[in-house]
Image (cartoon, rainbow, N blue to C red):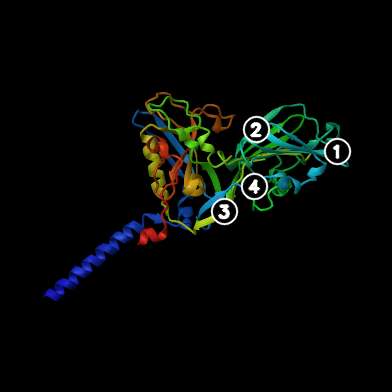
């Protein structure tokens, strides 16, 4: 009888332990499962606690990703050696000012000029401008109208010629320029995705491409300080020092993970970037929370009155501070939305101006959902921990 009791106790303990471990493990999914979950559109109408209506009609955006590593990143060095990869700096005119070091190079044969600037205040930011010394040599057609059109990335067909038939497609523009840009960064494997496209039709028709860097195929969406940029409301406490703009530059010049490329039909361009490159991969792949948990976390904010409009929900990396102020790339969901820090405010904040980018809307913010836990990263709760990397969860942690 005693032996039977021992066996029963052992079996009960084993079943309890197995059940608990299974329940913990099932809270997490791998990236393959998450991608399948993200194919389902999220269409819902909500009423917040103040009686306001909020409509959501989006499909989560997640790229062709095979795994999600945790990466330590660093800024690639930009120096005169980088500039010399493209042209002979000895034959260029060099100027120094308080903000930049600038090289002006002229090709005597083609009459083309290159202006290359390295920022001093915002370290390792590179600005490139190419063009003709004499615009009479430009083959740009004259267009009397002055029109400008805006397209979000999911509205863009990169094979299309938006500047008119027999001109250049967006893809042809990028294919022409990006190899030239890569020459300035020979030790970087540059990868990008399009965020936004402006099409300008005037006497110098051009594309303005806002690009986002990717590492390992995963887009770098933001810096951890992004949710508190441009808050237009009065808060009931003094914002911590780390919320201030100067503090969000802790990872050097990387406070907005965007490249800007302007390309005109005469094949000349301007480009500025503050890039990152992989220094070390500290974890090969991490578990992620389910899509349902992410949506539930956002729904709570909608019902509480904080979120009025949702424009996009994207998976990718956020830049956080790690040990010794290193830059760590951590997986998040970026919620592009109208976010009201004082939810009692009565204005509906409905989107009214459809002819301008939604990024210009009043109280547009990029808010953060922790992609491992599904937690809404509320700046009002995090305060002086806003820039610090969340706890990293590994597959070993959830099975131990």
Residue at 52%, 26% (x, y): give it.
Answer: 352
Asked which quadrant contains residue 91, the reply is top right
Q: Position of residue 265 (x, y in %)?
A: 77, 38
Asked whether, in this view, residue 176 is left or right of residue 374, the answer is: right
Q: Secondary structure at mark 4?
A: loop
Label 2 to label 3: alpha-carbon separation: 39 Å
How packed is label 3: few (under 14 Cα within 10 Å), some, or many (20 or more)? Answer: some
Q: Residue furthest left?
A: 1
Report if the CB atoms under discs 3 and 4 are less than 8 Å apart: no
In the foreground, 274 or 29: 274
Give the residue pinned by disc 3: 279
Asked which quadrant contains residue 353, the reply is top right
In the foreground, 167 or 300: 300
Label 4 to label 1: alpha-carbon separation: 30 Å
Q: Residue furthest right?
A: 109
Q: Secondary structure at mark 2?
A: strand
Report if the CB atoms under discs 2 and 1 are less than 8 Å apart: no
Residue at 84%, 32% (x, y): give it.
Answer: 134
- The mark closer to the camera, 2 or 1, is 1
In primary-sequence order, the first of circles 3 and 4 is 4
Label 4 to label 2: alpha-carbon separation: 36 Å
Q: Which mark is residue 111?
A: 1
Q: Secondary structure at mark 3?
A: strand
Give the residue pinned by disc 4: 77
Give the residue pinned by disc 2: 149
Asked whether, in this view, residue 369 is left or right of residue 14, the answer is: right
How packed is label 2: few (under 14 Cα within 10 Å), some, or many (20 or more)? Answer: some
Q: Position of residue 336 (x, y in %)?
A: 49, 38
Asked whether, in this view, residue 350 is left or right of residue 267, the answer is: left
């Amino acid at each position: 009888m005693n032996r039977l009791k021992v066996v029963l106790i052992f079996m009960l303990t084993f079943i309890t332990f197995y059940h608990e471990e299974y329940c913990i493990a099932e809270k997490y999914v791998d990236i393959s499962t998450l991608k399948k979950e993200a194919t389902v559109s999220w269409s819902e109408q909500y009423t917040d606690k103040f009686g306001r209506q909020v409509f959501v009609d989006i499909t989560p955006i997640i790229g062709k990703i095979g795994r999600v590593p945790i990466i330590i990143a660093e800024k690639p060095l930009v120096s005169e050696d980088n500039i010399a990869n493209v042209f002979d700096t000895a034959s260029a005119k060099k100027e120094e000012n308080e903000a930049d070091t600038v090289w002006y190079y002229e090709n005597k044969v083609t009459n083309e000029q290159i202006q290359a600037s390295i920022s001093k205040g915002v370290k390792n930011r590179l600005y490139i401008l190419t063009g003709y010394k004499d615009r009479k040599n430009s083959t740009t057609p004259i267009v009397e109208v002055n029109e400008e059109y805006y397209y979000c990335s999911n509205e863009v067909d990169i094979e299309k010629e938006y500047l008119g038939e027999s001109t250049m497609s967006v893809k042809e523009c990028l294919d022409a320029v990006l190899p030239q840009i890569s020459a300035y960064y020979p030790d970087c494997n540059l990868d990008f995705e399009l965020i936004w496209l402006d099409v300008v039709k005037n006497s110098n028709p051009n594309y303005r491409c806002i690009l986002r860097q990717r590492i390992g195929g995963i887009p770098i969406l933001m810096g951890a300080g992004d949710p508190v940029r441009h808050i237009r409301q009065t808060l009931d406490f003094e914002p911590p020092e780390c919320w201030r703009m100067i503090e969000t530059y802790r990872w050097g010049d990387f406070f907005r993970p965007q490249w800007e490329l302007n390309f005109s039909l005469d094949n000349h361009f301007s480009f500025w970037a503050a890039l990152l490159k992989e220094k070390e991969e500290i974890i090969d792949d991490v578990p992620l929370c389910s899509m349902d948990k992410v949506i539930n976390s956002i729904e709570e904010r909608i019902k509480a009155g904080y979120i009025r409009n949702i424009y996009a929900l994207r998976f990718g990396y956020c830049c956080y501070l790690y040990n010794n102020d290193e830059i760590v790339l951590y997986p998040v969901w970026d919620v592009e939305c109208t976010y009201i820090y004082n939810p009692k405010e009565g204005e509906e904040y409905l989107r009214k101006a459809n002819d301008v980018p939604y990024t210009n809307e009043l109280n547009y913010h990029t808010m953060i959902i922790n992609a491992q836990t599904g937690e809404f990263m509320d700046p009002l709760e995090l305060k002086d921990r806003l820039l610090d990397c969340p706890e990293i969860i590994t597959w070993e942690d959830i099975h131990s």
